[in-house]
Image (spheres, rainbow, N blue to C red):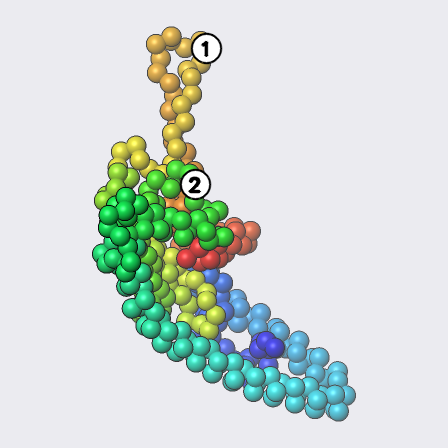
Amino acid sequence: MKSSSTNNNKADFGMSDLEASLPAAAAALTAEDRVGLVNALKSKLRNLTANHSDIMETLSPKIRKRVELLRKIQDQHDELEAKFFEERASLASKYHELYQPLYTKRYEIVNGIVEVDGVNHGDKASEDKGVPEFWLNAMKAHEILAEEITERDEGALKYLKDIKLIMTKNPKGFKLDFFFDTNPYFKNSVLTKTYHMAEDDEPIIENAIGTEIEWYPGKCLTQKILKKKPRKNGSKNANPITKTENCSSFFNFFSPPPIPKDDVDIDEDAADELQSQMEQDYDIG
């Protein structure tokens, strides 16, 4: 059962109510643009309410009473659903804390900080500490992540030591920290992806921010260099023409799609595409 936006008792929406209903792409617009969108939604809601009243007037008194009772049942459902979301959030927070000691033990084993009982240090197979390439293999085993990881990415992801999830309250959301060993690809020791969520019961992204990766020269995995031969009528000694293009890479995850700053920059199709990209980005996270 879903809440009915045509309920007369809910017709008088405030700014916060409507903003929570905005799609992720629109929710990240400037304050002025959001006011415009909210006002437009208010107008549509008034029309819906008027249409609802017209429909009710066409019903017989008996059917109208039945519909009114159904609306009260829906209101009771909505109250229970609100409690469900509240308790679910509390339960998720509780278990997030309970998981932490297990994540610490995993980190220590994967990175060779502690040894597992029964390992014979004389075995050649145990010369490598911990579990090499643990996170690379774990990510490749994940259905969604596996599609994002290219063969070029694997070299850098071999240096991934740990991934940590941190919940944030102000603003509401979470962040993912990717910890890397010193590597020949980029200078950063930690790459972070932060998600700001709308103040709503369901996960709606308002914004996503990623770390700017400090690539070493010639090591950028999100771009590729194309070389073309000079035209035939050009000089024989002319250098090849080089062109840099963006390419598929897991590390594009840290460069989320930009959110337009005003509604002039985006039409309905572009907004749908942006929404799709943001949802895909969230699924990866």
Image position of 214 (left or right of 27): left
Residue that mark 2 sits on? 150
What secondary structure is found at the residue carrying circle 2? loop
Query: Which quarter of the rendering shows the N terminus?
Result: bottom right
- Dot 1: element: loop
Q: Is residue 35 visible?
A: no
Where residue 149 appears, as percent x and y from the top left, is 43, 44
Q: Position of residue 245 (x, y in %)?
A: 41, 34
Which corner quadrant holds the C terminus? bottom left
From the viewer's perspective, is 72 left or right of 139?
right
Residue at position x 46%, y 67% in the image:
203
Nearer-the-camera pick, 13 or 226: 226
Q: Where's residue 164, x and y in %?
A: 31, 60
Q: Which residue is mark 1?
A: 232
- Depth check: give the residue in front, 281 or 121: 121
**How dense is the environment of label 1, judged by Cα within 10 Å: few (below 14), some, or many (20 and up)?**
few
Q: Residue at x 32, y 66 (%)?
A: 102
Amino acid type of the residue that numbered disc 1 sits on in the rendered structure: Lys
Residue 27, position as x, y percentages in the image:
44, 63
The amino acid pointed to by label 2 is Thr
How many C-alpha atoms fall within 10 Å of the one at disc 2: few (<14), some, or many (≥20)? some
Q: Residue 131: in sight, yes or no? A: yes
Which quadrant would residue 200 be assigned to in this image? bottom left
The quadrant where residue 69 appears: bottom right
